[in-house]
Amino acid sequence: MSQSKTLVQLLQAPYDSGHFALRMGAGPSALAAGAADRLRTGGHDVREQVVAPTSSWRAELKTTFELHRAIAVL
């Protein structure tokens, strides 16, 4: 029995309090790397995308809502 390939999209929003890849924001890339490898080993097509805020000015709540809006349209 053959399995069909499933497209899996891994979205990363590696921000904590408006800061990129710091503290909890460092977690998504580590988690996605392990997940992507396991999924590919299982024969799945994996696409990874890092979601970024739209503005250059970072503020905790503002950046959070920007990231939520960006994820919602994907």
Image (cartoon, helix red, strand yellow):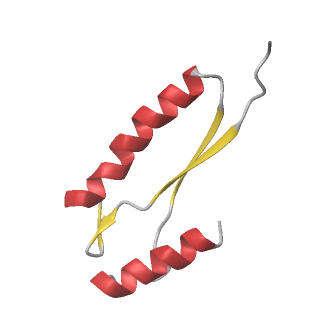
- Residue most extreme to the left: 23
Q: Left or right: 59 with respect to 46?
A: left
- Residue most extreme to the top: 1
Quarter location, residue 60: bottom left
Q: Is residue 7 above or below residue 39?
A: below
Quarter location, residue 15: bottom left
Q: Is residue 64 above or below residue 11?
A: below
What is the x, y in percent for residue 49? 55, 53
Q: Quadrant of the C terminus?
A: bottom right
Q: Is residue 61 above or below residue 15?
A: below
Tell which of 7 and 62 is nearer to you: 7
What is the x, y in percent for residue 12? 46, 56
- Residue most extreme to the front: 1
Q: Left or right: 58 with respect to 50?
A: left
Q: Left or right: 26 with respect to 63?
A: left
What is the x, y in percent for residue 57? 35, 85
Tell which of 24 and 4 is nearer to you: 4
What is the x, y in percent for residue 58? 32, 82
Q: Is residue 5 above or below residue 11?
A: above
Q: Quadrant of the N terminus?
A: top right
Whether residue 71 is visible: yes
Which residue is painted at 59% across and 22% down in the image?
42
Which residue is painted at 79% across and 16% down in the image?
2
Which residue is painted at 25% across and 75% down in the image?
17
Whether residue 56 is visible: no
